[in-house]
Each structure stands twice: as C-alpha cells, then as structure tokens.
Image: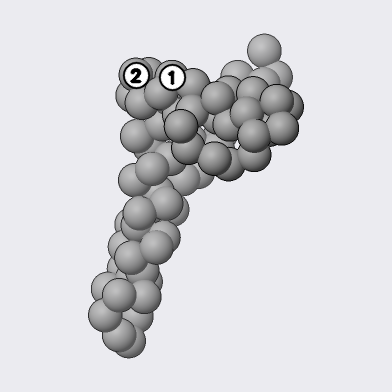
Amino acid sequence: MTQWLVALGVVLLSFAAMPWIVRWAKSAGGKGKMGGIAMGLGLVFAILFDPAKREAIENIEDQKARREEAGQGEKLE
C-alpha cells in the first residue's frame, strides 16, 4: 500500500510542477535548451502509459542481456 501512495505522490507532484517547468522553459534564454528534457519526459510518459512500447523496450533489453551472457556483446545479427 505504501508503494502505491509513494507512486501517487510522485505523479501528483510531477503534475503540480508541470506549469512551473513550462514557464521556466519558455523563459530560458536560447532555443533548444529544453529539447532533451522534453524528450526525456515524453519517453517516460510513453513508457508509463503505452504497455506495448514498454514490452518492446523490455524485449530489446532482454535480447541485449542474452547476447552479453552468450559472449556476443553488442553485435547485430
């Protein structure tokens, strides 16, 4: 139960901080400074709310782990 409360708190805190983050991003001096952060946030939300994408990413990570265990490293087949 505690884990759910912590997760809910993190989600609510991130939603509450979103207007501040957007204001800060708009007032930032140059172009492109927030691109990486925006991409990271988009990826996090995509993974959280898109089960198919999450499963695909997990499959890729499993394949990489199996290749490393077999001694093939990062080679593509």
Question: Which residue is at a point 39% across and 63% down the rendered structure image?
Answer: 36
Q: Give the CA distance from mark 1 to mark 2.
A: 5 Å
Label 1: how many residues lie within 10 Å, few (<14), some (14-19) or many (20+)? Answer: few
Q: Quadrant of the N terminus?
A: top right
Q: Disc 1, disc 2: CB below 8 Å?
A: yes
In terms of secondary structure, where does tag 2 sit?
helix
Residue that label 2 marks: 52
Amino acid beneath label 1: Glu
Residue that label 1 marks: 55
Residue 34 is left or right of residue 31, and the answer is right
31 in relation to 2, above or below = below
Please give the count of numbered marks on the rendered protein.
2
Q: Position of residue 48 (x, y in %)?
A: 42, 28
Can you tell which quarter of the image residue 61 is in? top right
Can you tell which quarter of the image residue 32 is in? bottom left
Q: Nearer the viewer, residue 47 or 60?
A: 60
Q: Nearer the viewer, residue 12 or 41?
A: 41
Q: Nearer the viewer, residue 34 or 17?
A: 34
Q: Position of residue 35 (x, y in %)?
A: 33, 65
Q: Is residue 48 visible?
A: no
15 in relation to 26, above or below = above
Question: Which residue is at a point 35% across and 57% down the rendered structure image?
Answer: 38
